[in-house]
Amino acid sequence: MKRIIYIILLLLFSVSYSIANGQLKKAQKLYESNYFSDAVKYYEKGLKKEPQNIKAIEQLADAYRRLQDYSSAKKWYQKAVELNTQNPETYYYYGQVLKMLNRFQDAKKQFEKYVELSSGASAKLLGKLMVQSCEEGQKLSKQKPYFDVILVKGINTENSEFSPFLYNDELVFTAERNPDILNDRTFSVNNKPYLSIFKASSKTNSKTEFDKITLFDKRFYSDFHDGPVTFNKEGTLAFFSRVDKSAPNKNGVVTSKLYYAVKNKKKWSKPKAFAYNNREYNLTHPALSADGKYLFFASNMPGGKGGMDIYVSKNDNGKWSKPVNLGDGVNTPGNEVFPYFYNGVLYFSSDALPGMGGLDIFYVREDNDWQEPINLKNPVNSTFDDFGIFMYDDKHGYFSSNREGGVGSDDIYHFERIREDEDLKPKTKILGLFEYKNLPKDGVTLQLMNENDEIIEEIKTDEQGKFVFKNLSPDENYLIMLKEEDITDDYKLYLLNENGEKVQLIEHFTKSKFKFKALPFDEYNGMELLKEEDEDLFTIGLSGQVYKLLPGDVSNEMEIMIVDDEGNVIMKTFTDKEGKFVFRKLRPDENYLLMLSEEDEDFKIVMFDEQGNLLGEAERFKNKTFKYRRLSPDENSITLINEDDEVIRISQNDRFIVSNILYEYRSAKLNETAKKELDKLVLIMKKNPKIVIELSSHTDSKGGDSYNMKLSNERAKKAKEYIISKGIDEKRIVSIGYGETKPIAPNTNPDGSDNPEGRAKNRRTEIRIIKW
C-alpha cells in the first residue's frame, strides 16, 4: 500500500543529491521523476563502481521501499547505516522496514537513532511514537487472534486491489488494472496500470468468492487515478478520489481531489468537485456516514498534525461545512489515512500510532470525542500495511493488506470476528443537566457509580449546569451520586438529547442518588421533549394535616420534610395555618418517613388524598419522625397523577385508554404519532419499575372476525416490541389482541347505518395494570 500513499504524498521525503557517476546520474533522474522500477536497475549498476556512494545507496533503499521490496530495501538501508550516515530519515525508514519484517528490537534501535539525530519537536515525537510502537507491536503479534481472516477469491491479482465496499450486493473496489484492452497506460512510479474503480459480483451470492468483474461506472472513470469510493446507506450519494493530471499546482505537481455524484433512479450524475478541493494539497480516501451527513477524508492540507491527517465535514442543508481536523486523539506527526465510519466508530489506518508495523487499522469512538485510538489487533493487523476496512455487519467485513501470502501487491481479505473485544462492544454516553431551585447550577461534583456502588468517574457540572458521562454500556443501570453536602433539596437531574433539550427527568433513588438505565445515545435523540407536565406523569400526590387533639388545632406554620431511612432529606415543605401540607411527585411504590421541624409528643399526622378522603394516620416512628405506608395489606389501589395533573385512584385490573396509538391502514406498523405516545408509556414504566401491564389492542367491526383478531394481535405485539426496544423488560408487558369482541361504543347506529364515531372509539389500545 505504500505506493498508494506515495502517489498522495508526492515524494515529500524524497532525497535529491548531486551524483557524478553516469549510471547513477541516470538513476537519480529516473528516481526524481518517480520511475522507481527503472531507477533501481541503474543504481545497482552504478554502485558497483562507487560502492561507498552513501547518497546513491540511500536513494536506492528508498526506491526499493516505495516498490514494497522490503528485503532489498533492508539490504541497502543497512549499508547506509554501516557507512554511518547522518541522515535521520534513513534511520526512520530503515526502522519501518525492519518492523515490517517482524524485527521489532532492531527497528527500535533505528528509531532511537532517529530521535537522537532529529532536531524538530515534531520529528522527535514521531520517533518516540515509533519506539513505543515497536514495544506494542511485539505484544500485539503474540495475542490470541480476534478474527478469522481469509483471502477473497476471484478479485485479487499480481497488482493492487484495495478499499472494498459492498454496494447493491456487489463488491466495489479500487484496483491497478486496465478497464479494457485499449487502455494500457501505466503509472511511472511502479509501471503498473492507473487506479480505477471496479465492481465484482457472485453467482452464488458468496461474500468471499466473486466471478464477474467490470468497471463500476464510466462516469467514475478518467485517464489517471480514480478511487477509492464511498457511498451512503441508500446508495444514492457517492464520493471518490481522483488525481487530475490536467490541473497541476504552481510547482507543476498534480494532487488528489474529491468528487461526488448523485444517483437518480438508475443513473449516476456527472461527478462534481468537492467545494474544498485545492491544487496545493491532497484530499483523498473519502468515507461517508450511513446517513450521508458526515464526510471523513485524509489530507495533507496546511495546519495538520503530520503527513496525512483525518478531517471531517458536515452536510448542513445540502452545503458541506469547512473541514475540521479530528485532532490529536487521531492524528499524529505520521500518516493517518483510509477512514471508515460505522455505527458511531471511526476506523482508520496509521503508520505512527503504536501498532504491529506499516499501516495498522485503529478505531476511535465518536462519543469519546475521537480520543484514545485502539488497535484492531491481529490478524486483521499484521507487520505489513493493513487499511481500507469495510463492515457489512458487526462481525463481518473486508480490508486490504500487502501482507505475505497474498496473490499480489495489495489484496482484499474477508474477516469474521471469532472472539469478543470488550473495547468494541457498543458504548453510549449521557448528556445531563443539574438544576438547583429550578436554575442550572455549575461546579457541582457528580460521581457515576455502577450497581455495586463502585465509583466509575467523577466530574463537575459546567457553567450551564451540564455534564456528560461517556463510555457507558447500553442497558446497564447506573447511579449518579451528588457529592455536595450543602445542596440538600430542591434539585433535579435531567437527561438531554444532542441538542441540549430535556428528554427525561432522572428519578431519585435516595436523597443524593439518582438511578437510570443507559440507552444507545440515538434513542435519547428520538425521545419526545420533556414538558413540565411530563414530570408529574403517574406520580403520587401525598397530603396531610398536623394536629394534636383534633385536626385544625395547630395554627402555627412549621417545616415538614420527607426523609429516607438514614434521615437524609428528600423533599420539604411548610404547613399552612391549619397544619395542612401537600407533597407531590413521589413514587407510588415507596414508603415515606415524615419529619417535623418541631418536637412535641402530642403531635399527630393524618393523611388525605387530594379529594379530602381520609387515608389513615401516620404512625409515630421516633421523636419527630412519622412513618406512613402508602398501601395497607388489604388495600388494592394507588393514588397517581395523570397527564392533566389530576389526582386519580387506580385499582388493580383497572383499564385506561392510551390515545393516539394509531397504525397504518390495515397494518400493524406503528406510525410516528403512535411511537411518541408509547414513549410516554415507557416513561411511566421507567418511573414505576414494579408495575406490570397488559397491553391490549381492539378493532372496530369492519372486516371479518378472524382478520380483526389477527390484526389486533399483531398490533399489540408490535406495540410491545417497541416498548421493549426502549429498555423495558419484556416480562413486564403482556400483549393481547381482542379484535372486535370488546366494543365500548356501537359500531352502527340504531337504524343500521354506519357509526364512524363509535368505530373510532373501538379502534383503541388499552393498558391494564395487573401488578405493582
Image: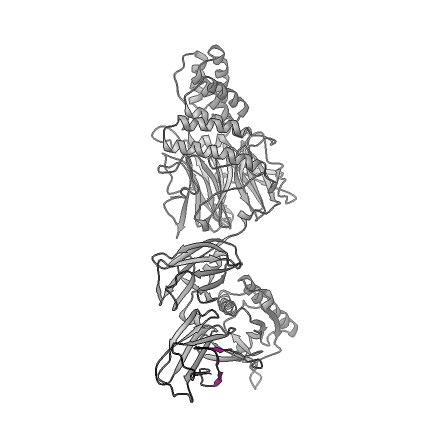
Q: Is residue 369 visible?
A: yes
Relative side of 479 to 212, left or right: left
As for residue 613 lying within the magenta part, the answer is yes
Q: Quadrant of residue 409?
A: top right
348 over 119 or under it: above or below: below
Q: Is residue 187 visible?
A: no
Q: Nearer the viewer, residue 160 or 513?
A: 513
Q: Looking at the image, how many numbered discs can be counted on the residues?
A: 0
Please provide percent x and percent y for residue 303. 35, 38
Magenta region: which residues?
A: 608-628
Of helix, strand and loop, which mostly describes the magenta segment? strand
Please provide percent x and percent y for residue 635. 56, 81
Please provide percent x and percent y for residue 750. 56, 86
416 over 247 or under it: above or below: below
Task: State the residue lying farthest toward the top.
Answer: 49
101 over 147 or under it: above or below: above
Q: Residue at position x 45%, y 51% from top?
A: 367
How is colour applied across the structure in the image? one colour
As for residue 380 lying within the magenta part, the answer is no
Please provide percent x and percent y for residue 330. 44, 42
Q: Residue at position x 33%, y 57% from top?
A: 463
Relative side of 255 to 699, left or right: left
Q: Nearer the viewer, residue 491 or 292?
A: 491
Q: Quadrant of residue 419?
A: top right
Q: Nearer the viewer, residue 569 or 696?
A: 569
Q: Quadrant of residue 253?
A: top left
Relative side of 570 to 106, left or right: left
Please state, as top left, top right, bottom left or bottom right, where the C terminus lies in the image.
bottom right
